[in-house]
Amino acid sequence: MRRTRRRGQAPGDRPERAPRQLLLVTFVSTLDRFAMAPMLVAMARDLGTPLSAMVHAASAYFLAYGLTQPLWGMIADRFGLVRTMRTALVLAATATAVAATLGSAPGLAIARGLAGACFSAAIPACLVYVGDTVPAPRRQPQITNLMTGAALGTALASAGAGALAQYTSWRLVFAITGAAALLLAASLGRVPEPPLLRANASVLAPVAAVARSRPTLMVLGLAFVEGMVVLGALTLLPAAVEATGASGSVAGAVTAAYGIAVLGGARLAGKAAQRVHTSRLIAFGAVSATAACALTALSRAPELALPAAALLGLAWVSMHSSLQTWATEVLPCARATVIAGFAMALFLGSALAAVLAGGYAEAGRYAEIFAMAAALAVPLGLAATVGRTRWTRPEGEHGR
């Protein structure tokens, strides 16, 4: 039986916090997504393929992650958020386990693409869960809290994956993330399923609503560019550090500063969101992203890449969490579709950045890659800050 929101349910009846298990969803999904970046050089060496082939394999993950967002959004609307997450995680565990056994770059790209397509249901479903169950004034702190799990996953993937690839095998990393996804699918059985608020809506209605909404299209465009800048820079940062002669474990440890910065800044950003206008958080994040990319363009030495990674983390926790929250509020009647489109745009931008930068990375032209990212971060920050300042919240949504 399809459920709808009970009549008379007031915003005050909603819970103030999202289930803590959702932190595990963001942790495991992020752990798998960021595990490959610090292993690119080791994987290329082990498989005897050019580094650009491994960069393209990583881009296959991001491309599939982005393209499948609308599909998972429709499935979640019909069958429930928690059920969708559990099914997707089982499929992701299978694809990740297969990736650990393959010995060719094309096969690995396919397996990682399938894993990305399945893991893509995880974090967007968490965001929709928060949007459907937590009142607007409490929403950004809860979304920021979810980023704690993502930060832990990023830090562990960055530091641990590089070390495991160097001293054991990159295949062990995929075996671990696959097993973690399987265990998480089982643990999600304890999470309550929220009402199916959009079960009776037509598939095309929310898509048409998004297409008619200029603010929503602007948010999606900003997410696309943010994916190119922040995720694109983070994906190539470990390989850029290794190009200076540093080991894979050192490059991974440097990149782990990103996760540590997100972890340390998550609660601060959540508290700041209740005191300052969201546009200021976006501006701070844009400045951090620009500084990080500019610093890395000057030098990829570990001692400079370390603060650059931390600045990228601050950009993510302030600018990205603000854009995510904006996505949950900009068009409430099509929230699931907007969240799916947001994630799709973000990772399509990341995939495009990886494809465009593959040849530069193969030639060791990392200074040019990060200089272009810094240049792109400036209009991103200006457009996002001005757009969020001028945006008027829809009736019925309350907050900053």
Image (cartoon, rainbow, N blue to C red):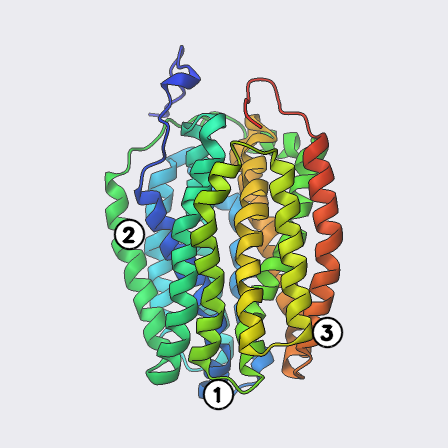
Q: Residue at x 57, y 81 (%)?
A: 51
Element type where label 2 sits in the image? helix
Depth order, front residue of 60/191: 191
Amino acid of disc 1: Arg
Q: Residues within 10 Å of mark 1 (few under 14, many from 20)?
A: few
Look at the image and tell me whether residue 120 can be seen: no
Q: Residue at x 43, y 18 (%)?
A: 11
Q: Residue furthest top?
A: 8
Element type where label 1 sits in the image? helix
Distance, label 2 to label 1, CA atoms, is 32 Å
Q: Which mark is residue 368?
A: 3
Q: Assign the C terminus to one quadrant of the image.
A: top right
Task: Please determine whether, in this image, residue 16 is positioned above or below residue 302.
Answer: above
Drawn side of residue 115 relative to residue 69, left or right: left
Q: Which mark is residue 45?
A: 1
Element type where label 3 sits in the image? helix
Q: Residue at x 48, y 76 (%)?
A: 251
Which residue bears the numbered disc 2? Answer: 184
Distance, label 3 to label 2, CA atoms, is 40 Å
- Residue 76 occupies which quadrant of the picture? top left
Q: Residues within 10 Å of mark 3 (few under 14, many from 20)?
A: some
Amino acid of disc 3: Glu
Amino acid of disc 2: Leu
